[in-house]
Image (cartoon, rainbow, N blue to C red):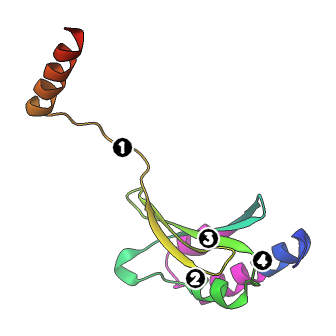
Amino acid sequence: MLDEAGIRAVAQSIIDQSKSSARVDTGALKRSISFTYVKEQVIFRMLYYGQFGKNSKLEANARRLMPNGVKWKIIYTEFGGGTFEVGVTQTGRNSTRKIIDSITRSSTTAVTSLLNKIRGKKKD
């Protein structure tokens, strides 16, 4: 297993290759590709253009170049603010999930009345 400096060097080479393969737009995509190393995990970040695909080979480069045993993930951020992540666990399992930034609470009159009935029964 590599030490922290070795992992950072591999991650930087992944970033460099991904920036060179990125679709040329206004430059926002190339500026958005970055990484951080936190708690023995590499976190890559990139702006996600849904209509054009992923626009760079960041995920392919990470799968190809990251050494086994190093936990990493890619967090894609959409224009609307939504995020989702793709990654690999230490055992090599692929993982994809949508990150829910905020949960909105919505209650209907039926749910409210049901809660009031339940609360009323507990008081008796």
From the top left corner, tell me how far across and down residue 25 is, in percent.
49, 79
Res. 60 image quadrant: bottom right
Q: Who comes first in sequence, dot 1 or dot 2? A: 2
Going by the numbered disc 2, the residue's amino acid type is Glu
Q: Who comes first in sequence, dot 2 or dot 3? A: 2
Secondary structure at badge 3 equals strand
What residue is rendered at 36% in x and 43% in y? 103
The label on residue 7 is: none
Going by the numbered disc 3, the residue's amino acid type is Lys
Q: Which residue is mark 3?
A: 73
Residue 114 magenta-drawn?
Answer: no
What residue is rendered at 42% in x and 74% in y? 49
Give the spatial CA distance, label 4 vs label 1.
35 Å
Range covered by the magenta-colored residues: 13-34
The label on residue 12 is: 4
Farthest front residue in view: 124
Give the spatial CA distance, label 3 vs label 1.
23 Å
Give the spatial CA distance, label 1 vs label 2.
28 Å
Q: Is residue 41 left or right of residue 47?
A: right
* Residue 33 visible, this orientation: no
Q: Is residue 80 left or right of residue 18?
A: left
